Image: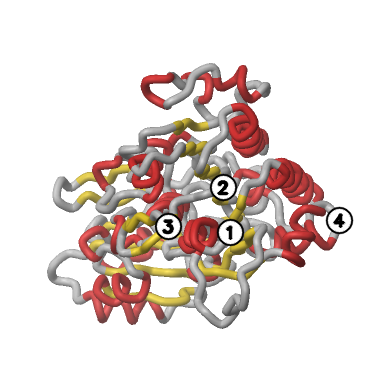
Amino acid sequence: MSRIEVNGRSYRLPEQASVVVCVDGCEPDYITQAVAGGHMPWMKRVLAQGSAVIADCVVPSFTNPNNLSIVTGAPPAVHGICGNYLYDSENGVEVMMNDPKWLRAPTLLAALARAGRKVAVVTAKDKLRQLLGHELRGICFSAEKADQATLAAHGIDNVLQLVGLPLPSVYSAALSEFVFAAGVKLMQQRPQDVMYLSTTDYVQHKHAPGTPAANLFYQMMDHYLAELDALGCVIAVTADHGMNPKTRLDASPNVIYLQDLLDGWLGAGRARVILPITDPYVVHHGALGSYATVYLPADVAPGALAARIAALRDIEIVLTREQAARRFELPADRIGDLVVVSGRFVALGGAAAKHDLSGLDAPLRSHGGTSEQPVPLVMNRRIPELDGQQRWRNFDAFDWVLNRGS
């Protein structure tokens, strides 16, 4: 049986249509509550008859690092994407990590296409498209810019006509529905061997598990997954990260502004706080997450400052560069001198004056730390003698559908 090896892992070439779905921000309790409320009949059946575990995503529990881990089958130490945003210390600038130049490893998607398999990628936001589609000879487009897809650049054109839905707003549940609808239409009209679908966490940032809006979203998702299942697809569903409230009792954002704190301790501007959650779509989270990196001047000892930050209430852990690279499997040259992770109900900020929270029309919900690491990993095929004690990762999803899904 034909196999390929990518980033030290061996995969069987698909003999049936295989789909991996990354549900952005899918705290496991969203599925629990939706199933319990009768909103996900397909998922309820799969949980009983297929395979399901609570897996770990990678830390930082942000979109870019985890999507790239899923499609490379490896942690950020291998593929190099350690945030949505980073400080390029070599050039002294802060930049988005959307450019494929930051990738240090090939994707399984590109390797499958080179092996002659038909591969399609549909992502909600365009920020991920270039990374996921790097060197991919196949279909790769975003719901956000579906109207701009061309055969030459995206492997497909006339996407709106194919899907039969209007171009959705980037700040809407409709953006994710477009991803699912496109996946179903592609499988029906242009059958693919492998498909990767990645949604947006707009709903999860605004609505807690079990709320009407959340249940409606998961009901929609369940409908499309059932359609893919009916087409004979092997399907694995996972997430890039979970989601938690980051609020005080009065529903105001519960934030530790690290840049302001360090400016007071060390002097203005001597330390640089980087918030890797930052991306072009900050309306629903205000660039506030549970993970930050800190770059220090040469005369400040990282260990001593780490202890001082760690002593603050609601800080979960502070690690030096070497400790963080080891513990979280990160590229040491792309993180700060310190990595700071806050507790479950607390977010980290830079300088308070630089965070625009005017777009928050609901109590802050966000992610980034170890509290948002547990995610679902579900497949509509049963794995015999599945080891529930093993530490499964969200980036085992392709191993499940390709190696264990027959």
Contact flag, marks 4 and 3 (Cβ < 8 Å)? no
Front residue of this view, candidates 250 and 122 = 122
- Check disc 3 and report its element: helix, strand or loop: loop
Front residue of this view, candidates 246 and 125 = 125
- Please state which of the two labelled residues, at mark 4 or mark 2, is closer to the viewer: 2
Crowding at mark 2 (Cα within 10 Å: few <14, some 14-19, many 20+): some
List the residue tagged with mark 2.
16
Disc 2 residue type (three-letter) = Gln
Q: CA distance from mark 4 to mark 2?
A: 30 Å
Find residue 28 and report its horizontal and vertical position in percent. Answer: 66, 64
Contact flag, marks 1 and 4 (Cβ < 8 Å)? no
Disc 3 residue type (three-letter) = Met
Q: Residue furthest front?
A: 1
Disc 4 residue type (three-letter) = Gly
Contact flag, marks 3 and 1 (Cβ < 8 Å)? no
User: Does 267 sit left or right of 50 as displayed?
Assistant: left
List the residue tagged with mark 1.
406
User: Does 90 sit left or right of 347 as displayed?
Assistant: left
Q: CA distance from mark 3 to mark 1?
A: 13 Å
Q: CA distance from mark 3 to mark 2?
A: 14 Å
Where is residue 260, by image quadrant? Answer: bottom left
- Please state which of the two labelled residues, at mark 3 or mark 1, is closer to the viewer: 3
- Please state which of the two labelled residues, at mark 3 or mark 2, is closer to the viewer: 3
User: Does 104 sit left or right of 232 as displayed?
Assistant: left
Q: Residue at x 60, y 75 (%)?
A: 386
The first of marks 4 and 2 along the sequence is: 2
Contact flag, marks 2 and 1 (Cβ < 8 Å)? yes
- Check disc 2 and report its element: helix, strand or loop: loop
List the residue tagged with mark 4.
38
Q: Residue at x 43, y 69 (%)?
A: 341
Disc 1 residue type (three-letter) = Ser
